[in-house]
Image (cartoon, rainbow, N blue to C red):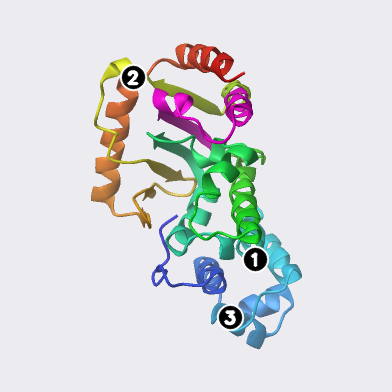
Amino acid sequence: MTIPPGIGSTVSPKEYFAAEFRRRRKEANLTQKELADDIGWSVSMVSMVELAHRKAPQEMIETMDKVLKLDGALTNLWDLVSHVGSQLPDWFRPWIEIEREAETLRAWQPLIIPGLLQTRDYAEAILRSKPRITPEQLDEYVTARMERQTILDRANRPMLWAVFDEGVLLRPVGEDSVMAAQLRHLTEMSERPDIVIQILPLDARATIGLTGGFVLAHARRGVVNAAYIESAGAGQVTDRPDEVAVLALRYEAIRAEALSQRESLKLIKETTKKWI
């Protein structure tokens, strides 16, 4: 999906949901009154939800999903924004639904295991290094990251193509047992038909991807592409065609130097032994 107009880094989860709620109504060519009549709620409630003045009741969103035949899209977003969105970085919020609606995701990561493939212990070891983080915040952040991974288990899950540097397998994150469990998890995930994992070997001497990680998303509806780009501090979410095109070319250049899926799995299994 396209990043909704007006969604910026200072938007609250409630405001983000309100913009998507309004977009769905307009796509259905309904006025607020027409939607209210169709779903059995008052016009004032529909208006307040769209203005982010009230949080939409779950029953209201579930009914809207059924009436507009959205296949649970709004319910999924409501749940994520309500329980997880407030724990994600401001800049990352527009990516929440883009990721959840994607048909394909193509990830490149030179430093760590991509977030969608991390174990809870691995994610915790990474997030624990955040300056001044409290135990409560750590638990919230880790839970948010684990919640994102549920897109890989749903019926209409996206195809995930993940490429990362061999150094990621060798870089200690947490205890040795954490690394061993993480690499075993990669082995299990790579055996799924909708997940492809490839490793860029150290001897490839490729440097094009060393400037940072990124993920490309192709939406289910339409041909809209979007990406999020990692950087020190805050990242960036973009759907600008020129920026996405540059990243797509960079991804293909990196993947061209990577090991095959079979060779990558073999390397992951061999490296796992080093952590046991």
Sequence-wise, the earlier of marks 2 and 1 is 1
Residue 70 visible in the current orientation: no
Residue occupied by mark 3: 32
- Residue nearer the viewer, 117 or 196: 117
Sequence-wise, the earlier of marks 2 and 3 is 3
Residue 245 visible in the current orientation: yes
Report the Cα–Cα distance between label 2 and label 3.
57 Å
Mark 3 surroundings within 10 Å by alpha-carbon count, few (fewer than 14), some (14 through 19), many (20 or more): some
Residue 8 placement: quadrant: bottom left
Report the Cα–Cα distance between label 2 and label 1.
42 Å
Where does the C terminus fall, quadrant-wise?
top right
Q: Amino acid at mark 1?
A: Ser
- Residue nearer the viewer, 246 or 142: 142
Residue 84 placement: quadrant: bottom right
Residue occupied by mark 1: 82
Establish if 199 lies above or below 228.
above
> Are the two marked residues, 2 and 3, in contact with CB atoms closer than 8 angstroms?
no
Q: What residue span does the magenta drawing correspond to?
A: 158-185
- Horizontal side of 165 relative to 98 (left or right) equals left
Residue occupied by mark 2: 202
> Could you tell me which secondary element the residue under label 3 belongs to?
helix
> Are the two marked residues, 2 and 1, in contact with CB atoms closer than 8 angstroms?
no
